[in-house]
Image (tube, rainbow, N blue to C red):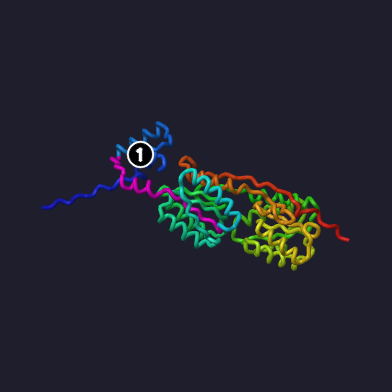
Amino acid sequence: MTQRTTATPTVTLSDVAARAGVSLATASRVINNSAKPVAPELRTRVLSAVEDLHYVPNVHAQNLARAQRTAVGVIVHDVSDPYFAEITRGLQRVAAAHGRLLLICNSYRDPERELEYVALLRAQQCQALVLAGSGYHDPQFAERLDEHLRALEAIGVRVSAIGRHDLRGATVRPENEAGAFALGERLFATGHTRAGVVAGPRILTTITDRLAGLRRAAELCGRELPDEQVVYADFSRDGGEAATHTLLDAAPGTTAVVALNDAMAVGVLAAARARGLRVPEELSVLGFDDMPIARDVTPALTTVRLPLVEMGERAMTLVLSEDADSGHDETVPATVVWRDSCAPPRRMP
């Protein structure tokens, strides 16, 4: 009579980490003799768990992972946008210093495309993932994306995000609301009472935060920023130009226009020229981000500076650091840069 045997369940690295009460990254560093330091007490617990569970590392899988996991996936809205080009410079600088290759994916602000890219980057066995674009006001998308990120974390892929996403992973959060508040407070202090806003897509959390800052400044200064003086458009130069015409047609007494990025502000300047409005004598124009072009347009653009290259550097540093907490959340400052495109409103007769 043939006796049946029961296969012994395969012990995984996750089992070892759970038995030792440490993170997957810590267990991996001990077993693979990583150069990263591990506290002696943690090392002892991991080695004890290895012995108790009779764990045998899969050498072939280890070698395969070491050979392939040298790439970092980066999802941006549009790398041709100067905002993302600057962030990508920072990402690339740190990645190159660590011998990593960037795989850059343009989502063009399409949430479904972002989900597809996350799945593709997982299939490519990337070491880490950086979400470099704004978050979305879309709970269903956020839930689906979080599922993908949870699956990535389960296989040791670290994730970081730039902006307000409210997802798992480390976060580098620019002070969009505070920067817009500081810009609005100074604008209203110059005497403007009828300001309009050229905003990007409603679905982006970046737009929500910047608009919230402007509205908070308006309230503090006793001004109004009603919905009819806010026009949403594509986050581009052409979007800014079209939105400005819409705004000035609806509110011809507007004396200042705040664009929620510098590309749109360039469009505002173009619309002003087309209407024969002198900037800043008849219309003040303000932007956000302080792109390199902000200094070169005529007149030079008043805007809010974000340290975009540094933001990219921090996001990449976090995903390549095994010691960084996946829930780490840090902010980067925004500062007002006052230039020639904004002045007190012309006194009306």
Residue 133 quadrant: bottom right
Residue segment shown in magenta: 53-78
Out of 323 and 310, give the one closest to the viewer: 310
Return the residue at label 1: 31
Mark yes or no: residue 327 visible.
no
Specify whether 46 is left or right of 77: left
Look at the image and say whether residue 65 sits in the magenta stretch.
Answer: yes
Look at the image and say whether residue 71 sits in the magenta stretch.
Answer: yes
Can you say whether 230 is above or below 16 in the image? below
Residue farthest to the top, as pictured: 40
Residue 172, image x and y in percent?
56, 47
Residue 196, image x and y in percent?
73, 60
Residue under the point 73% across and 49% down? 338
Specify whether 86 is left or right of 215: left
Residue 260, image x and y in percent?
66, 57
Crowding near the residue tagged with mark 1, few <14, some 14–19, many ≥20 C-alpha atoms within 10 Å: some
Residue 258 quadrant: bottom right
Quarter of the picture containing the C terminus is: bottom right
Can you say whether 55 is above or below 237 in the image? above
Out of 274 and 45, give the one closest to the viewer: 274
Residue farthest to the front, as pictured: 296
Mark yes or no: residue 45 visible.
yes
Circle count? 1
Out of 56 and 280, give the one closest to the viewer: 280
Name the residue type under label 1.
Answer: Ile
Residue 180, image x and y in percent?
68, 51
SS for dot 1: helix
Residue farthest to the left, as pictured: 1
